[in-house]
Image (spheres, rainbow, N blue to C red):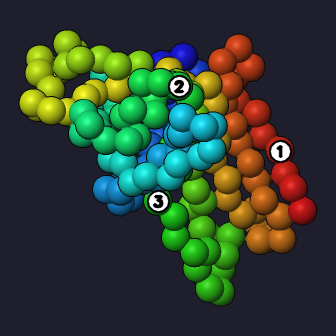
Amino acid sequence: MRWREVEEGAPEFAEKVRQLFDTRKHKTLATLRRDGSPRISGIEVEFRDGEVWLGMMGDSLKAADVLRDPRLAVHGPTEDPPEPDQSSWPGEAKLSGRAVEDGGASEGAVPEGARSFRVDIEEVVLTRLGDPADHLVIESWHPGRGLERRTRR
């Protein structure tokens, strides 16, 4: 699924997720190492033309990971819930899917030595505190199911 499908199917949800991702430059990327164990790396994410894009140094371990096994997860930057009104916390956002190498065709060029990946999205999640702040509100988007909401105490 492409990001534009989330935007079209649940525009308010997509906007909240994008705002959370855009609060800071650096996000956290989870990939799988050759032996199957997880690797956590810093990453920058760009929402452009209805897609989610990742750029990596061509010889980086994270690029080697997604070229070998494209499954990944990206967690947006987070803040602690504010005191005293924790229910005003905007929450945290994450997405998971598969990396598809682009090679720069969509943007015209990728800097020498770099790699560009589009993310085929399999899940987008927004977690926040409810009002009152005694429970979590978890909204998620999945292809074929659309937007779902659940709470957890």
Residue 17, relative to residue 34: is it above or below?
below
Residue 51 visible in the shown view: no
Q: Is residue 70 left or right of residue 87?
A: left
Q: Horizontal and vertical percent for residue 71?
A: 56, 29
Residue 95 placement: quadrant: top right
Sequence-first tag of 3 and 1: 3
Query: Which quadrant is the C terminus positioned in?
Result: bottom right
Q: Give left or right: position of 150 versus 77.
A: right
Label 1 SS: strand
Q: Secondary structure at mark 3?
A: loop
Dot 2: within a 10 Å radius of its alpha carbon, few (fewer than 14), some, or many (20 or more) residues? some
Of residue 112 and residue 10, the one placed in the foreground of this image is: 112
For image coordinates 34% across by 19% down, the residue present is 101
**Picture layout, residue 152 above or below residue 117:** below
Q: Nearer the viewer, mark 3 or mark 1?
A: 3
The type of residue carrying mark 1 is Arg
Tell me if mark 1 has few (under 14), some (14-19) or many (20+) residues whose alpha carbon lies within 10 angstroms of its own.
Answer: few
Above/below status of 80 relative to 93: below
Residue 19, horizontal then vertical, whole percent:
43, 50
Instruction: Name the front one of labels 3 and 2.
Output: 2
Image x and y of residue 115, in percent: 25, 29
| The N terminus lies in quadrant | top right
- Tell me the mark number nearer the camera, choosing from 1 and 2: 2
The residue where tag 1 is placed is: 150
| Alpha carbon distance from label 3 to label 2 | 24 Å
What label sits on residue 69 in the rendered view?
A: 2
> Which residue extends farthest front?
35
Residue behind mark 3: 77
Residue type beneath disc 2: Asp
User: What distance separates the C-alpha of mark 1 from that of mark 2?
Assistant: 31 Å
Q: CA distance from mark 3 to mark 1?
A: 22 Å
